[in-house]
Image (cartoon, rainbow, N blue to C red):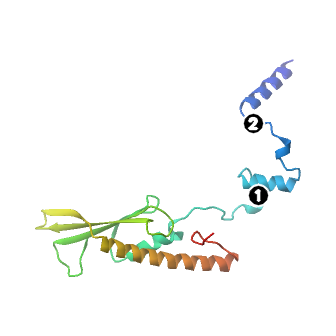
Amino acid sequence: MKLLIIFITLISLLASCGVYRPTDARKIPPNAKERVKKNLEEGKGFRLSQLGKNNTNFQFASSNPIWRASLDVLEFAPLINANYSGGIIITDWISNEDGNPIEFYKITIQFLSNEIRSDAIKITLHEKKCENIIKCNVSEIESDLIKSELSKKILKIASLYEKQDVEKLKEELGEYKSNTDKK
């Protein structure tokens, strides 16, 4: 009797937790290989042969062409913040080429997308003019020319990096289609 009560309780608990879900036999393929393929496509399973292989869509800083290109373009400036997960690079205050001790500039790049396109990054420029060491005025530079030149340079280098990455993947894996290939 005790065993029957435990069994009934266990069945009702399992049914209420959603472990048992009635299915329509017409929607499930009868062939086991087709069922496995369908389950894997829906993300319901895994294969032991696929363990350890990189099947993710994550992009790390070293694999993101826009990030790498931005760091290359800003290599002349010391960085205060380079946060890939936050999508931002901020330089320290830098002086212009003539070494004027009263004028300094700061560049901020925000990443809005991983795709290589003109609206993928937002560039902000700041200028700091100092009358003396204590009294300084900071303002945003509204020069679209400088911003567009920086953006063009970053995107050009990023597209070259992506092309190199695609060529490398083609060598390793055979055929590879990038995000920028037309469908």
Q: Reading the chain from its start, which is encountered first: label 1 or label 2?
A: 2
Q: Give the residue displayed 55% in from the left and 64% down from the top.
A: 59
The residue positioned farthest toward the top in the image shown? 1
Compared to 143, does 1 lie above or below? above
Quickly name the residue at label 1.
47
Q: Give the residue displayed 24% in from the left and 81% down from the top.
A: 97
The amino acid at mark 2 is Val
User: Residue 7's image quarter?
Assistant: top right
Query: How many marks are shown on the rendered structure?
Result: 2
Q: Give the residue displayed 19% in from the left and 72% down from the top.
A: 103
The residue positioned farthest toward the front in the image shown? 183
Compared to 164, does 124 lie above or below? above
Dot 1 surroundings within 10 Å: few (below 14), some, or many (20 or more)? few
Compared to 98, does 68 lie above or below? above
Q: Is residue 165 visible?
A: yes
Assign a secondary structure to mark 2.
loop
Horizontal arrangement in the rendering, residue 22 relative to residue 116 (left or right): right
Mark pair 1, 2: CA separation? 22 Å
Residue 75: horizontal and vertical position, in percent? Answer: 37, 76
* Viewport quadrant of the C terminus: bottom right
Residue 182: horizontal and vertical position, in percent? Answer: 60, 71
Residue 19 disc label: 2
Assign a secondary structure to mark 1.
loop
Dot 2 surroundings within 10 Å: few (below 14), some, or many (20 or more)? few
